[in-house]
Structures are given as structure tokens and as C-alpha cells.
Image: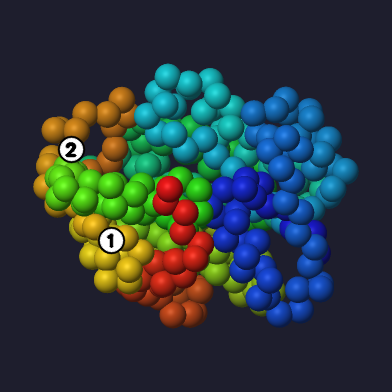
Amino acid sequence: MKILITGSSGQLGKTLIEDFKNIRNKNQFKIYTPSRKEFNLSSKSDELESFLDKLNPDWVINCAAYTEVDKAEEEQELAYQINSIGPKTISKALERNKGKMIQISTDYVFSGGKGSPYKPYDKLDPISIYGKTKAEGEDYVISKLKERSHIIRVSWLYSSYRKNFLLTMLKLHQVKGVNKETLKIVYDQISCPTSANSLSKFIWKIILSDKKLAPQIMHWSDAGVCSWYDFAFEIGNLALEKGIIKNKALLYPIRSSEYPTKAKRPNFSLLDCTESWDFFDGQIFHWKIALSKVLGNSRRLNIF
């Protein structure tokens, strides 16, 4: 079985590759992890389709995305090309070759106005260019591949790799904590962090599950609920406790209106992951435990 992982240099791609080493009977699988130069979703569609037709993968895990939420408001064409047209092109090639696809999406396809956890088939209502392009990408994939596609929406993804909220906060705690400076963190945006470790295991479960068919649209996060303030607070506490940082900054909670950004964010984008957790049939960790596990492997962390 051939499995293509796009965006393999990103935090989820790297985690998927790392977890693949622990898969039983992995000799039955061949994973392909092209560099951005070899396979770039901003490239022309015919170039991407040619690559896919030649490789003819059984599965594509599309981790590649334009994720600069604020910058997308200015680089709308590029965000649209990568997040919408890119998945559409992949799905067109897989439609011809009978391949399957996992498309990673986001809680930002919702407006945040529902007031309760979003279910997989709730109406999409994105309020940013990033959210709109990801929603269009979902639609393209589903319309082309139908039951051979799986959309996984994720909230607040982090890992020990690349650039994300965890690594940013570790650095800020360490630097600002020297003189006990204050960090202002938004407290009125609510969702749940997602460890790339748990998401990776869920994705491999879908691919390796030959008897149980995964739902077409799924939500995934770790368990619990929190604000960005809660997340930043716990990062500082755990990292200091584990000796990863020597200093911890003071945190001050602020409203999102006090921290204006170019792109709007949903105020409440908690995902209802019940169906996905049932399919996974494994241990689901509270986000604080998942965070502790990531920080426990401190040799991977690169905060400076």
C-alpha cells in the first residue's frame, strides 16, 4: 500500500512519520514524503496531477495547508490556491485512480456563535479567509471522492515541532519570566488543544482499520475545554515543573477585543469528538495530560 503524506515537514507530517516507525507489519506499507520543492500545493494543478498519476497512491494524507490566519487576509489568492484548489486537485487525481484521502481541516470553518460544541455535520460559517478556504477545500474533496474521503477537523494543533502556540509560549515564558514581565493572553476564545501525537494515532487508525469504516466527516481534539489563557498558564506551570524552562512569566487575561487581529477568530469553537473517539476505541487523554506527555519528551523541543 502506497501512502503519500503532503506537508511532511510540518508538525503533523513529522509526527505521522515518527509514529509510522512503530506500526506493526509496516513492511506492507510504503510512505512517500515529498519535499515542498517536489510537491507544493501552490504549484500548477497539472503538475500536481502528473505527480499523483505517476505515484498512484492508495492514500493521501493532506497535512499541507496555508495556516497563517492573519496573513491569509492579505494573501487571499495564495491561501485559496493551497487550501482550496490544492485539495481539489489531489481529489481529482485520486478520483481517476480510485485512491482515498484524509483531508485535515480546522475548527475555524465555524463562526463560533453556536454556543455549544460543534458536531461534524453542523452548518459551516467561517468568518476569516483562512476558514473560508479550508471550508471550500472540504467541499471539493467530498464532492469528488465521496465515501473515499475523510475530513478531520482539528482545533488548536500543537507539537514539539515547527511553529505553534506551545513553542511560542515556552519561549515567551523563558524570556519574559527573567524579570517577571507580564504576558497578555486572550481568555474569551474557547476550544480545546490538540496534540499532534493523538491526532497522528487517530489518522493511522483510520488507514489501518480494514474492517471498520470511518465516518466521512470527523472532529478530533484531546478531551476537555479551555481558553488560550488556560493553555498558556498550564504550559508555563508544566514546563517549569519539568525543568524545560527556568523562568515563568506572569499572565494577564484579556478580551479578544483588546488584542485586535486582521482575521476574526471564533469565540467558541469546541468540537464534539464523540463519534471519532468511539471509532478510535483507544485511550483519550485530557488536554492537560496530553500536554504533559509532549513536554515529557523535552529532547524534541526547540524553543530557541
Badge 2 marks a residue whose secondary structure is helix
Give the left or right position of residue 186, taking residue 85 as reference. left
Q: Is residue 22 above or below residue 45?
A: below
Work out whether residue 124 or residue 228 is closer to the camera in this orientation and state it: 228
* Image x and y of residue 285, in percent: 37, 74
What amino acid is labelled 1 in the image? Lys
**Residue 213 in sight in this render:** no
Q: Which residue is mark 1?
A: 246
Q: How is the image coloured?
A: rainbow
What amino acid is labelled 2 in the image? Ser
Work out whether residue 22 or residue 270 is closer to the camera in this orientation and state it: 22
Q: Quadrant of residue 117?
A: bottom left
* Image x and y of residue 144, in percent: 66, 42
Between discs 2 and 1, the one toward the N terminus: 1
* Image x and y of residue 129, in percent: 41, 28
Q: Which residue is mark 2?
A: 256
Q: How many marks?
A: 2
Give the left or right position of residue 209, taking residue 84 as reference. right
Which residue is depicted at the point 80% across and 59% down? Answer: 2
Which residue is depicted at the point 53% across and 20% down? Answer: 77
Badge 1 marks a residue whose secondary structure is loop
Q: CA distance from mark 2 to mark 1?
A: 29 Å
Give the left or right position of residue 304, taking residue 47 as reference. left
Q: Is residue 204 above or below residue 12?
A: below
* Image x and y of residue 188, in percent: 16, 46
Q: Is residue 44 above or below residue 2?
A: above
Q: Quadrant of the N terminus?
A: bottom right
Q: Nearer the viewer, mark 2 or mark 1?
A: 1
Q: Residues within 10 Å of mark 2 (few under 14, many from 20)?
A: some
Which residue is depicted at the point 22% across and 57% down? Answer: 248
The single residue placed furthest to the right in the displayed view is 54
User: Which mark, by number, is residue 95?
Assistant: none
